[in-house]
Image (cartoon, rainbow, N blue to C red):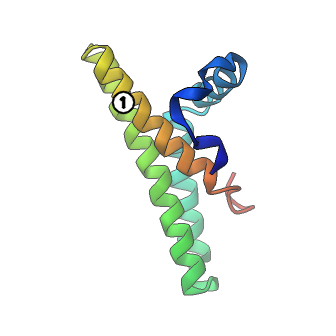
Amino acid sequence: NVLQGGGGGGEGDGLNTQLEQLAKDILGKDFFDKVVTEYSDWLSKSGSALSADDRATHEKAIQTYKDLVEALQEQQKVKDDKLGEEAEKAAQAKVDEKYGLVTDLGALPDDVQ
């Protein structure tokens, strides 16, 4: 994924970073919690109509969303517990990584909104 290359280099383009941060804040834990729930429901309803490969792909995608929710929960805990800047940076890096993986998944199935 081209966008993820380089790591620290992208900070100069403030606006993109701000927009991405805004998206993360708006699409916070509750949003992704809801995605996990609805996506899982959708898969259990439609799963039988899918090929094994497709089902595996969707299961992996749901797990990716769950990982992001966990990272967001962890990040919140680090902030609440005031574990300091290093811990917050580490938590943020983990969220960014999981968020990148979610972004790579592309669109959700049409019935999941």
Residue sitting at x 50%, y 51%: 65
Question: In which image quadrant can residue 16 be found?
Answer: top right
Q: Is residue 51 above or below residue 84?
A: below
* Residue sitting at the far right: 110
In this rendering, position of residue 52 left or right of residue 12: left
Q: Is residue 54 above or below residue 106?
A: below
Question: In which image quadrant can residue 6 be found?
Answer: top right
Residue sitting at x 35%, y 21%: 88
Q: Is residue 24 above or below residue 38?
A: above
Residue sitting at x 30%, y 25%: 77
In this rendering, position of residue 62 left or right of residue 3: left
Residue sitting at x 68%, y 55%: 106
Q: Residue 29's x, y, as percent?
A: 49, 35
Residue hosting label 1: 91
Q: Residue 22's x, y, as percent?
A: 64, 23
* Count of numbered badges drawn on the protein: 1
Say which element carries label 1. Answer: helix
Q: Residue 59's x, y, as percent?
A: 49, 68
Q: Residues within 10 Å of mark 1 (few under 14, many from 20)?
A: many
Name the residue type under label 1.
Ala
Q: Residue 87's x, y, as percent?
A: 29, 23
